[in-house]
Amino acid sequence: MSVSRSTKSTLADVAAAAGVSRSTASRALNDSPRISEATKERIRKIARDINFVPNARGRALAVGRSETIAMLVTEPLDELFSDPTYGAFLGGITEELSESEYLPVLLQASSEHERERVVRHFERFSFDAVIDISPYRGSDLLEVLRDLAIPTVLCGQLEGHPYRDVFSTVYSDDVEGAELAARALVERGREHCVAILGPQDNPAVSDRIRGYTNVLGRGLSADRVVCTGWSASDGFIAMRRMLERDIPIDGVLAGSDRIASGVLEALRDHGLAVPDDVSVIGFDDHPIAEKVTPRLTTIRQPLQLEGAMAADIALNMIRGDKPTTTVLHMELIERDSV
């Protein structure tokens, strides 16, 4: 049988050229253990020679998988694209999957309509696994994933680990990171610290408060802790309000580098020098930490590695591995602001 290489061939063309049934051709092209290696190689060569391109839907039916992994995001899109944390997660996931057969798919679920659409895809098993990069939001979706037994990896811990042994979890130790930050200020001799963090409902925030108070004790009273958003403007406004209270402040623990950049601006506007008058320490070690003046001392989270590990764990769960919990360490990066 002769097929022009300028046109795409079908599975029937491959089967006819190889002198086998369609089912045998399909199994050979999908690496079935029921077909000998010699036959697989012969059929693959024929498929290449006659320009056969497998149909994605047909392949999914043959192997029982969609060969896609959903990257679930429950934050609004503006936060997704403005916060470098999510970019680092997504970069690690996509890079890890780039050498596999699996296609990462961004799954947005911040609105009620989006969540309903996502649930329908879950119920159709459109994805072989899900990596949730903002698991502290959209808990109803986690319940659906649990009920459907879809392999799921959480990038970040939830209070009390309610899905232990159900989902895998990968996260950086926020308590450890916060302790490193607070200890850096203590070693600098700072005695009047304040903390400006992200939203109070984020488990990372409560962990960081715990880490700060583990080191500072009563020195970090509740009235010296502010929960706001993660952005520079949030940090600027919160710091300005702290300064308006006219309380002694010689150290600031910022919950993100973006918050810290706003803090630096507010302190500058107030006529205070960093680090001479006030020390400032950030969190994350995003590129902005190197760009602000002074360069920001901060806590480095291995975010890219966290994403890569989440992808690797998702692949293993698809193959049948049980859920795991992986905790990564943080690191103090010393620059000029402390």
Image: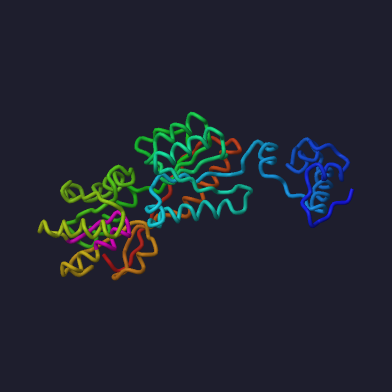
Residue 115 within the magenta-colored segment of the rendering = no
- Is residue 55 or residue 163 the one in the foreground? 55
Here the colouring is rainbow
Locate the C terminus by quadrant: bottom left
- Is residue 44 or residue 279 the one in the foreground? 44
How many marks overall?
A: 0
Q: Quadrant of residue 235?
A: bottom left
Residue positioned 89% across, 48% down in the render: 1
- Residue 289 point in image, percent of width and height: 35, 64
- Residue 231 point in image, percent of width and height: 31, 57
Residue positioned 80% across, 38% down in the render: 22
Q: Residue furthest top?
A: 147
- Residue 101 point in image, percent of width and height: 64, 48
Residue positioned 16% across, 70% down in the render: 271
Residue positioned 29% across, 69% down in the render: 336
Magenta extent: 250-263
- Is residue 1 or residue 291 the one in the foreground? 1
Residue 257 within the magenta-colored segment of the rendering = yes
**229 left or right of 103 in image:** left
Determine whether 13 is above or below 280 in the image.
above
**50 left or right of 88 in image:** right
Q: Residue furthest left?
A: 246
Q: Quadrant of residue 155?
A: top left
- Residue 323 point in image, percent of width and height: 50, 36
Determine whether 55 is above or below 99 in the image.
above
